[in-house]
Image (cartoon, helix red, strand yellow):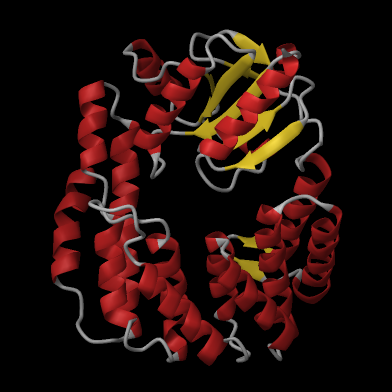
């Protein structure tokens, strides 16, 4: 089957229709999804370090598909049919860096897309805006928040208002956990449930997404005691989170098929080495098949302890929606940081470790 898919992909790319049409945009997205699905299936079978290096090189290039989509819709952003492909473009292009620079590759196109939403679509009762609201929420930047608030306030369709309210609450979540922000989140979530509970977003509903956000507020906000769990590491040894009492814990949810897998491995190896002599436990929660996790551990690719979570049960209990995701817990298991892997997570763990000494 993978051979058949491999043969089909170049054909699909070469036979894409030309001109700015909904059909062309849909075909570009379909081709990307087919390529990404094939790559993930191949990545799951890559056990040796050589195979993993090869599979990283063969990852479908998001930049190429983003550029193809922009070429198809960039001159037609005022047209209502471009709302959904524009949302897809925002999601796939966000964070792509110029390989020779540190700047975002599609920064100007992303800004043009957001400007078009604000000028041409935000006040229209078009249900396709629901998809755009969640694409904007994933960007989590000030302009996205401003656009979402305008849709929530000014769109004449109450259901679209509710979806925008939910997306706004999701963006505010990334701004902090102080009282005023928490009250705003709850107000937006209440409106989302009242106005749009039954609205479908992908394979779920606004009600379920809002319930998930309320769970985050109640159990996974800063200062809350992180939920306890028991898991099995790559050697078959059981581990219970509460047994780490007295240590800072950096929980890193990841897998070898996520877009930033190579960076995640390198960064976490360095972080684990840095904290080797400090009261910090770097603990991965990995969703690869157990055999692959064992292979990465045995050949030295991964140098920190990992629990096996191939069905994402632990990830679901921590409401992981983006990968990699990091929770930093103090020595009493209270949450001090929840977000991406990087310097903020590392600085938080370091500061908490210093407080123990």
Nearer to the camera, 178 or 315: 178
Q: Nearer the viewer, residue 273 or 157?
A: 273
Can the viewer see residue 313? no
Residue 48, relative to residue 167: is it above or below? above
In x, y percent, where is residue 108? 37, 73
72 to 179, vertically: above or below: below
Residue 41 vertical placement versus 140 (above, below): above
Determine whether, in the image, residue 58 is placed left or right of residue 343: left
- Residue drawn 80% across and 48% down? 217
68 on left or right of 347: left
For the point 58% across and 60% down, which residue is it?
203
Q: Is residue 12 visible?
A: yes
- Quadrant showing the C terminus: top right
Q: Is 70 positioned to the left or the right of 187 in the image?
A: left
The image quarter containing residue 294 is top left
Quadrant hosting residue 291: top left
């Amino acid at each position: 089957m993978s051979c058949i898919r491999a043969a089909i992909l170049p054909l699909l790319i070469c036979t894409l229709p030309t001109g700015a049409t909904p059909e062309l945009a849909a075909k570009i997205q379909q081709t990307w999804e087919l390529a990404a699905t094939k790559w993930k299936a191949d990545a799951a079978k890559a056990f040796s370090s050589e195979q993993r290096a090869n599979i990283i090189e063969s990852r479908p290039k998001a930049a190429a598909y983003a550029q193809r989509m922009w070429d198809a819709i960039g001159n037609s952003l005022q047209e209502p049919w471009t709302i959904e492909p524009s949302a897809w473009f925002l999601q796939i292009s966000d964070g792509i860096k110029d390989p020779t620079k540190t700047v975002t590759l599609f920064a100007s196109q992303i800004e043009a897309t957001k400007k078009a939403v604000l000028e041409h679509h935000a006040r229209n009762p078009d249900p396709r805006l629901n998809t755009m609201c969640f694409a904007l929420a994933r960007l989590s930047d000030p302009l996205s928040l401003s656009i979402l608030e305008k849709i929530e306030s000014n769109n004449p369709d109450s259901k679209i208002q509710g979806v925008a309210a939910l997306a706004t609450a999701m963006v505010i979540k990334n701004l902090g956990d102080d009282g005023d922000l928490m009250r705003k989140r709850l107000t937006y979530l209440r409106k989302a449930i009242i106005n749009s509970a039954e609205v479908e977003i992908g394979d779920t509903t606004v009600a379920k997404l809002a319930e998930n956000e309320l769970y985050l507020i109640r159990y996974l906000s800063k200062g809350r005691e992180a939920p306890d769990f028991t898991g099995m590491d790559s050697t078959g040894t059981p581990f219970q989170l509460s047994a780490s009492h007295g240590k800072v814990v950096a929980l890193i949810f990841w897998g070898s098929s996520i877009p930033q897998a190579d960076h995640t491995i390198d960064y976490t190896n360095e972080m684990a080495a840095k904290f080797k002599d400090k009261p910090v436990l770097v603990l991965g929660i990995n969703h690869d098949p157990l055999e692959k996790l064992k292979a990465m551990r045995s050949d030295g690719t991964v140098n920190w302890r990992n629990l096996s979570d191939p069905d994402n049960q632990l990830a679901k209990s921590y409401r992981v929606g983006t990968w990699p995701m990091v929770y930093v817990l103090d020595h009493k298991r209270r949450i001090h940081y929840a977000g991406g892997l990087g310097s903020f997570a590392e600085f938080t763990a370091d500061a908490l470790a210093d407080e123990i000494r």
